[in-house]
Structures are given as C-alpha cells and as structure tokens.
Amino acid sequence: MEDMYHMDRAMMTQQDTKISAKGVQVYYGDTHAIKDVDVEIADKTVTAFIGPSGCGKSTFLRCINRMNDTIDVARVSGDIRIDGEDIYDPRVDPVQLRAKVGMVFQKPNPFPKSIYDNVAYGPKIHGLARNKADLDEIVEKALRRGAIWDEVKDRLDAPGTGLSGGQQQRLCIARAVATEPEVLLMDEPCSALDPIATAQVEELIDDLRQRYSVVIVTHSMQQAARVSQKTAFFHLGNLVEFGDTDKIFTNPEDPRTESYISGRIG
Amino acid sequence: MPLSLPLVVILGLCLAGWFLAQSRAMSVSAGDRRKLASLPRQHGLNTVLSTAIPALGLILVWMLFGRLFSDSWLANSPLVFQGGVIAVALAGCLWSLGRIRIDFRARAAAERWIKGLLIFASTIAILTTVGIVMSMLFETSNFFRDYSWTDFFFSAEWSPNFRGDSALGILPLLWGTLYISLIALAFAVPIGLFAAIYLSEYASVRVRSVVKPLIEILAGIPTIVYGLFALITVGPFLRDYFAQPMGFGESASSVMTAGLVMGVMLIPFVSSLSDDIINAVPQAMRDGSLGLGATKSETIRQVVIPAALPGIVGAVLLAASRAIGETMIVVLGAGAAARLSLNPFEAMTTVTVKIVSQLTGDTDFASPETLVAFALGLTLFVITLGLNVFALFIVRRYREQYE
C-alpha cells in the first residue's frame, strides 16, 4: 500500500472505473434537471464538474450518494453503479451507501458539538470503533488527513462552530473521511472560503486522491484545472463534454464548452 | 371630569389644522409644490400631531396626577382644566402653522412626533409592570407587619380563619403548585416535543397543514372549559379506574386530574414553539448528518435536537410559568384543600386558587387573612419572573449560534 503512494501520478489516473452512470434522468417536480447523463468516474482520481449555475452539476453529484432521496419532489431514473453495484437497487440501503460515499457541502456545516464529537459522529454511528482509544485514534487520523490536526489538537473539546471558515471546512472534510468512505463528493467546497483557505483545501484534495475517488463541483475553472485530472462540463442538464482536464481546457471538442471556458456563456 | 368639550375642540382644531396647513403650504410656495421641502400633506400631518399630542398628553397627566391638587382651587374649577387643554391645543396648532416655510422640513418634524408616540407606547407597558410590582410590594409589606415572615415561608400549615389565629404557611400551596405543574409538564413536554418532531421532520406538507392548526385549536380553548372537562370526565375516570382499584383514595379531585388536564392545555405551547425552533435548525445540519450515513432518527436525536435544545428548554420554561399561574383547572380539577402529601390521587390546591379564595367575599384589605393574597401573588410573580428570565437567557444564547 505504501508503495502505491510513490507511484507515478500519471499511472494512478489509469485506474479502474469506480462510478459508472448510464442514462441518468432527474426531475424536480416538473423540471427536467438532468437529461440522460452517461459518465464513467475513475478510482483514485479527482473529477471536476463545471458548468454555469443551474446546469445540474450539483444535482448529479447528489445522485451519487442518493441525497436527492431526502428531497420529496426529486425523482431519479437511470443506472448508477459503484464498483458495478447498482446503487438505486431497492435492496441497497441509502444510509449505508452514504457511509461509503462521503460528502462535503458548499457551506461549512459543523454540528454544534465539540471538534472531537464532530469527527467521531460518523464512526460512532457506524460502530467503527471498539473502544475509546480506538475512537481517539480514528479521530486523530481523520483530523490529520483533513490537514487540521495541528491547529486543533489542543482544543478538541472546543465547539466546531468556533473555528474559522477554512478550518470549519477542513473539519467537515475530516468528518467525512472519518467513516472511511471510498468516494468523496464535494459540492463547491471552497465557495465560502478565502484564497488562503482555498489553497489549503485544494492541497488537501490532491492528497485525498491517493485514497479516494474524489468528485468536486466547482464554479471556478481555475480550481478545476488545478485540482482535477478529469473534467465534466454540464450545460442545461446535459453532460456536454467529459475528458482529461488538460484536453477540456486547452482543446475542447464541443463549441459550448469552448464558449464557457473562454467566458462567453455562463 | 368634563372631557367631551376639550376633546371636541381638539378634533376640530386638528381638522382645521390639516386643511389650513395644506393651503398655507401652497400659498407660501406660490402654488408650486416642487419648491416646498415637504409635501403639503406632510405639513398637514405635522400640524395635526402638534395640535393633538401635547393636548392629549395634558389630559392624561391631569387624569393621573390631578387628584394631588384636589384641595387647591385648580381642581374645583373645571373651566381651568378645560381652558388649559384648549389653550395647549390651540398653541400647538398655531405654532406649527406659523413654522410653515418653503424650506421647513415638516416630514422630519412629523416623524419626531410619531417616534415620541411609539416610545410612549413602549413605556406604558414597562410602567404598568412596575406599577403592578409596586402595588404588590406595598400590600405585601403591610402583610408582613402583621404576620411573621418565617411563619409564612416555612410553616407547613394553611388554615386561615377570621377569628385572628390563622396559620398562613405557603409551603402546602407551593407544594401543590409545583406538584401539579410537574405532572402537567411530565405529560406535555414529551407529547408536545414528539408532536413537534413529527410535524417538522416527518409529516408531509398536506398532513402538516391539517394537523398543526388542529393542535393549535387546543390553545384556543378557555381554561375554564378544560376545568369542566377535568371535573366531569377526567376526575371520575381516574377515580374509578386508577385511584379506587389501587387503593389511593376516593377523591375525584386530585393532583393527577388537574395535572393531566393542564398537560393537555400545555401541549400546543410546547409543540408549536418547539416546531418553530426545530424548523430554524439549518438544513445544512441535517444534510451533513445524512451525508455521513446517519438515519433520519439518528440525525434528529444527535444533531437536530441538540442544536435546538436551548430553544426547546426555553419553550418548556415558558410552558412551566403558564402551568404555575394556572387557576381554573386547579379549582375544578384538584379541589381547594391545602395539603402536603405525596399521593397524586389526593385533592390539593395551589397558590393561585388560594389567592382567589382569600379575596372573594367581604374583604377589607386590613387583616392578614386578606393581605396574605398579595404576599402569595408576589411570591408567584417572583417565581415565574425568574423562570421567564431564565428562559429568555437560554433562548438568547441559542440565537447567537446561527446568526
């Protein structure tokens, strides 16, 4: 496992498919929000979803961990598989699915609990720790992976809501990785952060790629170019173009992608 | 006090001022309203307010403090008072008419009058509270001149009589109040809270739109009707099916009867306040928890309720202060016997009931038997005030978290 970290990054992007979606449709009431989207997301890769507001990129992201189930009016059809397993199969428990597919939200949303309890929340629910020492270890590991351990190690009992915005978001990332997910979904994780905090989170995303398949929705094309290996461009509910990030940004095939990237639409 | 004449004159002056001010404003601007700093009707409004407010204020002051001068010549001549009021109104009217210039900002002047009115309204609410407390304090101090305060606060016997050897210990009454309130809260808090959780987290929009108003109807039932329900239905039911078979007593009036019915009365309080508070917990909290693979009930138990807890505690404390002040349900449900007992199926009574019974009938506000009502009232006031302050304190701390 340790050797994997030292492998060439180019090699690592050539992983198996982690998530595969075919013919996905989403309706919010009468609105057709996602129209027939097919996409294959690779393991141990950062995939960026870009596109103008309301194009459906967040909606599609929320299909991957079935968060749309919590919205009454949303209907999802089509086929989404993680490791070949249909996640919309009636036998699949969305609650267990979400333990496997972690999510980080647009606005940092720490619970009104201590920093420790914020991170311990997921492991406690899923019974990942056998005892207190075990839990302490999980929390420390998660906080280290969230690149926030050094800042909070002396005040784990302080409320998570008292941290700065960037620290809160890294706490939320730590909270999400504490349940050992296989996929990490990030819905505009830096939109509420200043440039310094953004840089910290982006660095963190690059680290996370070594263990997880990361899908990030972003409004910033620079951010997509910086952190991702694959980019998907959504427009009006359609997946317009999907490919290597370098190619999308330098030599897009679809004229709509080109217009968006050069700032003519959006 | 002959008030009708000054009131009619003030009304007339206001009407006249309204039209005069507008026409005067037009004439100073030579018919061009764009030259005016304020619109003619704003000049009119300013004149009306300047006429009415000082004159009405004088009437109010006279009604409150006029009797202080009842010996002097002022009080004996209604003409002086009437003339004074009319003079003030006329002066206000003329003064504001005289101020009308092209550049006079009547809009700002009227605004100041209105601000004054609003301040006055809020002061009245505060002064009334102060007045209530003062009158209670005054009568209570009279009571403690005749009756020892240690006996009042620490004696366990309550047996007033008008021969002059009454025992007026508050403890049995306070015990009854707290016991009944406790049963009421033990009943209302879980049911109200669970109803609120169902309504805010599980119920569909359609169910919610039916159920929530239905629960709130409970809040609109007069407490005397609850009392009747306790008297003819709940009391006999509890006696026949619980108290008698289990050997707890024969009384239909009991702490349990009053407590349960009061609990029903409090359900809409707890549920409606808690529902609002639970709804105020940001959706991001729920998403965060669901996104980690928590179930709905885990999310509610471990994230939503803890986040809403300070507000829910505030709601419970508000319900508690209502329970402590409740009278009618107790009179009809729990009886009027002052008693220190643990048996919930025995008749007991509360502070509020005894206040009523000490003050009904012929009273002269001189004997300790009647004055004790004020001491009881003040004690109750201090307790509920304490609870309310505590509730406000908690609710305020809660607010700081999400704003």
Image: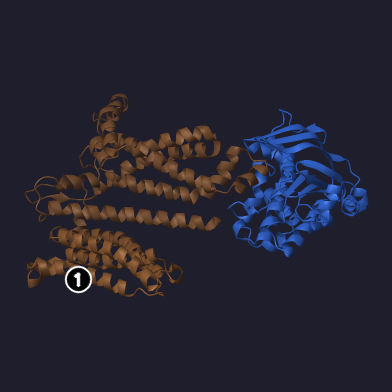
Chain colours: A blue, B brown
- The answer to which quarter of the image holds residue B247 is top left
Q: Which residue is depicted at the point 74% across and 65% down?
A: A196
- Identify which residue, A224 or B142, lies in the foreground: A224
From the top left corner, tell me how far across and down residue A160 is, in percent.
62, 56
Q: Is residue B235 above or below residue A197?
A: above
Is B214 situated left or right of A62 in this image? left
Q: Is residue A81 above or below residue A193?
A: above
From the top left corner, tell me how far across and down residue B25 is, in percent.
37, 69
Is A28 situated left or right of B36 in this image? right
Q: Residue furthest front?
A: B30
Q: Which residue is depicted at the point 60% across and 60% down?
A: A162
From the top left corner, tell me how far across and down residue A80 is, in percent.
78, 35
From the top left corner, tell me how far across and down residue B206 is, in percent.
52, 32
Q: Chain of mark 1?
A: B
- Disc count in the image? 1
Q: Is residue B362 above or below residue B112?
A: above
- Identify which residue, B359 or B7, lies in the foreground: B7
- The answer to which quarter of the image holds residue B147 is bottom left
Whether residue A178 is visible here, answered yes or no, is: no
Is B268 situated left or right of B136 in this image? right
- Dot 1 falls on a residue whose secondary structure is helix
- Identify which residue, A14 or A107, lies in the foreground: A107
User: What type is the residue that disc 1 sits on?
Assistant: Ala
Q: Which residue is mark 1?
A: B87
Check disc 1: other Cα within 10 Å, few if <14, some if 14-19, many if 20+. Answer: some
Whether residue B9 is visible here, answered yes or no, is: yes
